[in-house]
Image: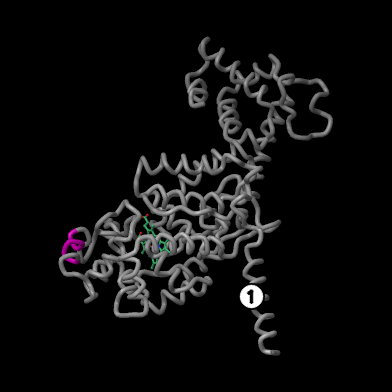
């Protein structure tokens, strides 16, 4: 009796802990604060995949490489600076992970609708889901509400991201260190049903491994010679490289896994039967894959007041705030010049740019310093929502420059507005 009570207590605690770990992530997290989020991400991913099929795979991998390094917190998106070392140049990422520009585009579009609301970490989670699905893979509800890391760790990226040279035991323990099972690992490896690898990632397998189909090896040596051609690409799935399906597993059964680590999943070991089962039952694979993606996406999210919402996925907000200050200072100096009235003397607060403050004098200052005006307006265009500048003020400026364009102000400035 006592032991069944203990059992019940332990079970309750486990359930509670598992439940609490991600208590704050929910698929509806942005339902009221950013209802257009889903559409923006999907449309941008569709555009990106229409331009280049591979990008869906690249973004899926980006998400994996984010989550395995101190949780899914957008840390992989941070650029290195003179004073900050991020994860982009960690060994498994350098000259290999890609897709950052697509995340930037999504972020810019999301910011235009829902300023400083949606984290880069969540955008990446949604983009990975949509990329997979648009290439024929399953879809799933993405729990949301992650916040963005204030930091990143190159050493954790080097330590945690599994190398293609690992054997089965090491692969299992790499995933287990993240709270994922061997089954999750095998299902998630099905991502290698899409995308490409560089010769340097599979050369050793072509030349040293014995569990490789000889015709396949000979064929791959065509793009990956014994020396040179390190960056030459071969598809991870020899049959359908741009279609998310279960051919990856049938390839493993015929010893046509491209990476050493791929073939480890089917090499007379504990996962052989699961590989066979996924190769025969695509529905089981799709279900397990979707569930495992949710579990991977739940790794150590920052929630509540932890972390931040970055407005630019490449920089911490602090840096963005510096830009904000620069722009405010620029606006202030213009504002001071445009009038000697006591308009701006009062409190030194950021420029209260409104239609009223844009008078002829302000405009003539602009004409005098056209380059500066161009620069300023360019910045305004990108950052306007975060300044809360009045739309009518911006429109007034635009009208003014359009007017001036007709009467010969530089084409450069005109071009800046044509993009709008
Ligand atoms: C099981 C351990 C894994 C290892 C050792 C591994 C290793 C690799 C390597 C070496 C590449 C090629 C990189 C290059 O040559 O530049 C690659 C590509 C890729 N990986 Fe993995 N991976 C693993 C698991 C995963 C998981 C869990 C996912 C996603 C959930 C994933 C998604 C991808 C995708 C989609 C690509 C192709 C990317 C592109 O074409 O840009 N991989 N992986």
Q: Is residue 394 magenta?
A: no
Front-most of residues 38 and 81: 38
Observer able to see residue 204: yes
177 or 356: which is nearer to us? Answer: 177
Q: Residue furthest top?
A: 407
Relative side of 339 to 211, left or right: right
Helix, strand or loop at disc 1?
A: helix
Q: Residue at x 35, y 54 (%)?
A: 244
- Image spot of residue 129 (x, y percent): 47, 52
Give me the residue at 67% from left, 89% from top. 3
Question: Can you say whether 332 is above or below 7 in the image?
Answer: above
Viewed as shown, does residue 205 lie left or right of 69? left
**Whole-percent x, y for residue 39 in the image:** 52, 40
Q: Which residue is mark 1?
A: 14
Ligand 1, what quadrant? bottom left
Q: Is residue 220 on the magenta stretch?
A: yes
Identity of the residue drawn at 59% across and 25% down = 373
Q: Quadrant of residue 25?
A: bottom right
Magenta region: 217-222
Percent coordinates x, y for residue 363 in the rendering: 65, 17
Neighbor class of circle 1 (other Cα within 10 Å; few <14, some 14-19, many 20+) is: few
Whole-percent x and y of residue 359?
71, 16
Q: Is residue 82 visible?
A: no
Residue at 69% of width from left, 89% of height from top? 1
């Amino acid at each position: 009796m006592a032991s069944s009570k203990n059992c019940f207590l332990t079970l309750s605690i486990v359930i509670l802990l598992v439940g609490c770990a991600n208590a704050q992530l929910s698929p509806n997290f942005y339902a009221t604060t950013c209802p257009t989020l889903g559409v923006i991400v999907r449309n941008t991913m569709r555009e990106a995949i229409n331009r280049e099929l591979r990008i869906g795979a690249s973004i899926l991998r980006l998400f994996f490489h984010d989550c395995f390094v101190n949780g899914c917190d957008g840390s992989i998106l941070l650029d290195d600076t003179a004073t900050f070392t991020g994860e982009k140049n960690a060994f498994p990422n350098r000259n290999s992970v890609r897709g950052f520009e697509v995340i930037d585009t999504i972020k810019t579009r999301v910011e235009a609708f829902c300023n400083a609301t949606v984290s880069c970490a969540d955008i990446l989670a949604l983009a990975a889901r949509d990329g997979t699905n648009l290439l024929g893979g399953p879809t799933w509800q993405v729990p949301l509400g992650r916040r963005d890391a204030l930091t990143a760790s190159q050493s954790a990226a080097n330590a945690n991201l599994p190398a293609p040279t690992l054997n089965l035991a090491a692969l299992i323990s790499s995933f287990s260190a993240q709270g994922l099972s061997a089954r999750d690992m095998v299902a998630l490896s099905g991502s290698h049903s899409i995308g490409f690898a560089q010769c340097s990632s599979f050369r050793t397998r072509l030349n040293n491994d014995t569990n490789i189909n000889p015709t396949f090896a000979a064929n791959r040596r065509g793009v990956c010679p014994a020396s040179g051609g390190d960056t030459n690409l071969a598809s991870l799935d020899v049959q359908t490289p741009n279609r998310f399906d279960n051919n990856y597993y049938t390839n493993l059964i015929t010893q046509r896994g491209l990476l050493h680590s791929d073939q480890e999943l089917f090499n007379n070991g504990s996962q052989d039967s699961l590989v066979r089962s996924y190769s025969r039952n695509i529905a089981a694979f799709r279900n397990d894959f979707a569930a495992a993606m949710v579990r991977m996406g739940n790794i150590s999210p920052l929630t509540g007041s932890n972390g931040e919402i970055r407005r630019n996925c490449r920089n911490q907000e602090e840096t963005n705030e510096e830009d904000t200050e620069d722009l405010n200072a620029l606006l202030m100096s213009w504002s001071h010049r445009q009038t000697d009235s006591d308009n701006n003397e009062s409190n030194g607060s950021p420029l209260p740019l409104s239609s009223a403050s844009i008078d002829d004098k302000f405009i003539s200052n602009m004409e005098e310093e056209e380059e500066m005006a161009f620069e300023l307006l360019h910045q305004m265009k990108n950052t306007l929502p975060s300044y809360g500048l009045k739309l009518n003020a911006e429109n007034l400026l635009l009208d003014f420059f359009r007017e001036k364009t007709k009467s010969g102000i530089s084409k450069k400035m005109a071009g800046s507005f044509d993009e709008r």
